[in-house]
Image (cartoon, rainbow, N blue to C red):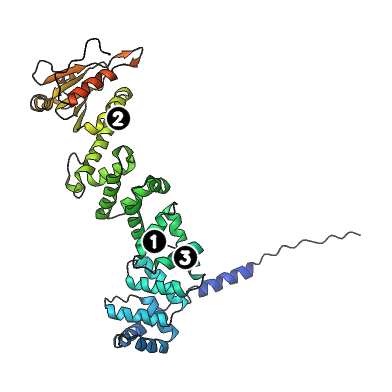
Amino acid sequence: MNKSYPTFHFFPHRLTEESKKIEEKYKDADKISEKLSKVKLPKLLKQIQQLSSDKDSLTKFAKKLKRIDINILASEFPYEIENEDLLNKITIILSVQYNRIVGKRFWGHFQLLPKDKHVHWMLNYAFRIEDANYLALNPTVREKYNSIFRTDQVLAGMVSNIGEENKPLVDSFQQWKIKEGSTLESHLWTMTLFKFIEYDWFIQKQGVEVIEKKLETIKLGNYKKILNRYLEVNDFEEYYTGLIKQALVSLGDPRESLVKWQGFSQDVIGKVKKWLIKTELFEFLDNERFNYWKKFIRDFRDVEVLENPQVAAMYFNGFVLVEFAEINNAAYFYRTEGFNNKLSHRMRTGVPAKDLKVKDTAYYINSLTHNKRNGKPVWYDKFDDYMTQYKNGNFAYKRHPKGRY
């Protein structure tokens, strides 16, 4: 005989609610009341200040302290004092009566005071004696911390290890228990960017937009150091557009003013200018001519671009080339000195294009057309021949009539 039994589903609502209440009630159980700290801390500091610095005296005193005293000393560090001797005594006392709360408090202090040597010393002690559950760290990260805090280069050690993990820093920081928005996080971002910004794999892993946002939060002096390292190591052809545009907003166009570019080498500034030239030519010229002239960007001394009429004056060593954006216009070559003295003043908005095409002058060198055959450019070789000669100062060069286009 078959029997059917009703199905019961147990939902422990009351138990869940009580658990939450207990958790909420005791979540700050290890925290010291502000009132109690104000009463006890001054007395503790005065007593410790009167002690001698020998370890035996400090150990003896520490063993007389109650757990609440140790927790107050750990929680209120660094007490708004700059007495090195007193701080040294306190860290020794805390190590004698160390408990898990001390370790947790100093990890919190590390987030706010990442360069403090007393915090480093205390955490070195904590990592040496704590069990594997301390801070609930990943075992690999815990081992790295064990090694890092034994050195006197804690932040540098963290930067090297975290940067080489080849993952987004936000993920590494989470795994390394670095609090978002903390002073520690800010320092590590700055130091890591300075150390790894030169590597494309690092930029790719973080994302250019992420790096741009972080750079916006960094002080100008540190920003310039990071940017200089990036610009110095990389070729201008490889610069990320976003990073350069950000630099131009922060520091201005180096062709117009170098005030905010102080501290950058002439080589770096020159590379930024070449990047700007390349970008302007790309926006100005059609693909056919841009693909030709971009190979000479390293030879450019300067480029001046007009939007109306659309004209670009490209300055080389000893001569100036004037290109017109509108097709069916020849390229005009002039000697630099004559161009600067007689023609450059005409490079202004609204000037008729014909006023920049001057042949009957001593500074005129030549004009070359952009020939095509069957719709394909055949002028590259001709321009190559003339450019080779002009770059060597041979402005009298004439190509053989039977030469190519």
Confirm whether residue 183 shows in the render. no
Which residue type does callout 1 highlight?
A: Met
Viewer-side label of 1, 3: 3
**Residue at figure coordinates x 41%, y 89% from the top left:** 64
Give the side of residue 11 with respect to residue 234, left or right: right
| 12 left or right, relative to 89 | right
Task: Please name which of the two marks, 3 or 2, marks the residue nearer to the observer.
Answer: 3
Q: Position of residue 289 (x, y in %)?
A: 29, 23
Residue lying at the far top in this picture: please name it: 402
Q: Is 38 or 94 nearer to us in this picture?
A: 94
Q: What crowding class fits label 3: few (fewer than 14 Cα within 10 Å), some (14-19), or many (20 or more)?
A: few
Mark 2 secondary-structure assignment: helix
Q: Tag 3, which secondary structure?
A: helix
| Tag 1 secondary structure | helix
Q: Which of marks 2 and 1 is nearer the N terminus?
A: 1
Q: What residue type is labelled 2?
A: Phe
Residue 143, label in figure: 3
